[in-house]
Amino acid sequence: MIFDTAIERLEDELGITCFVHARDLDRRLREPDSAEVGVREDEPVVTASVFKLPVLVEACIRMSTGEVPAERRIALGPEDFPVEGSTGLAVFSDAVSVSFRDLCLSMMTVSDNRATDVVMDILGRARVNARLRELGLTSTVIEGDCRHLFDTAAADLAALDPPVAYASADAGAHWLKTRTLDPGRTNRSTPAETTTLLAALWRDEGLPASACAEARRILGLQVWSHRLRRGFSDEVTVSGKTGTLPYIRNEAGVVEFPDGGRYAVAVFLRTPSPRSIGPRFDDAIADLAAAAVADLRSVRPLTQ
């Protein structure tokens, strides 16, 4: 199959370890063996910023019920921007006032770390994790917000012998020794549970329909086009969320074809390099997603 060949080739060429799952969102339940493909799909993975997906789900549910009004305004000053990040509020210099809905938008579209932490402060981590349990996603856990992830890494680097400064040039090479990259102790999921959550959003299953619609709208506005998006032609719609940390490169999303075919795809990579810029790894995500979806589309006619 195309997918198996792609896995073997890319792991050999790039020295990566792939954790992937893709599912046909519309195939009948009587065809479960042909409705999905994957590799290491049930193994725990470091989600990096893909953890913002379940945060978005909880936020959209709260907005749909009115518990957290979408238009609620949050005033933030420069002192409220302590979280590391290269996009959105994390790099703002001046005070702003923004709605809760638009904080969620910034959290997902540009992976805004500060917006994420403000949203999580409002929602409460325990409530997000409780929602995941309700949905049966027992392997998906949020241990902390973005600041927690970076503070944990800094503490673990400082505890090494000899200590490593978080901001030093060689810090990235030591991240594998931190809790932040330990799938047993950091924000985590599995590829299969990630596509299960995406399937619930696209099928309106177990969640308020209005919450699902808002989550789909926001996921469809992501600006990054260098991973999943690159695996598909222009007429195909791709909605998703990226995740990046040293040695970690991810994206999860839904691919929708003009003929009505819909596929949830989650690709999580362990790479041999801590560098944040890695076009060959980004291309691997595109190749794996495209191969997985191609195999699913070859199994049966979409009219069945």
Image (spheres, helix red, strand yellow):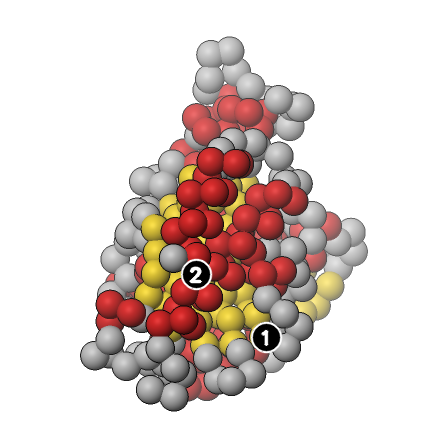
At label 1, counting other C-alpha atoms closer than 10 Å, the crowd grade (few under 14, some 14-19, many 20 or more) is some
Q: Is residue 206 left or right of residue 151?
A: left
Quarter in which the N terminus is drawn: bottom left
Quarter-of-image position of residue 186: top left
Q: Residue at x 59, y 56 (%)?
A: 227
The residue indicated by pointer 2 is: 292
Q: Position of residue 70 (x, y in %)?
A: 56, 79
At label 2, counting other C-alpha atoms closer than 10 Å, the crowd grade (few under 14, some 14-19, many 20 or more) is many
Secondary structure category for the residue under label 1: loop
Q: Are marks 2 and 1 in contact (CB under 8 Å)?
A: no
Query: Seen from this angle, which residue lies furthest bottom?
Result: 303
Q: 43 or 74, which lies in front? A: 43
Q: Is residue 75 visible?
A: no
Q: 88 or 40, which lies in front? A: 40
Measured along the vertical axis of the image, is residue 261 above or below residue 177? below
Q: Residue at x 57, y 70 (%)?
A: 238
Q: 89 or 236, which lies in front? A: 236
Measured along the vertical axis of the image, is residue 229 above or below residue 203? above
Q: 304 or 255, which lies in front? A: 304
Q: Earlier in the sequence, mark 2 or mark 1?
A: 1
Quarter-of-image position of residue 183: top left
The residue indicated by pointer 1 is: 236
Q: Residue at x 40, y 83 (%)?
A: 302
- Distance between the Cα atoms at labels 2 and 1? 15 Å
Quarter in which the C terminus is drawn: bottom left
Measured along the vertical axis of the image, is residue 93 above or below residue 196? above
Secondary structure category for the residue under label 2: helix
Please name the amino acid that badge 1 sits on: Val
Q: Position of residue 23 (x, y in %)?
A: 37, 68
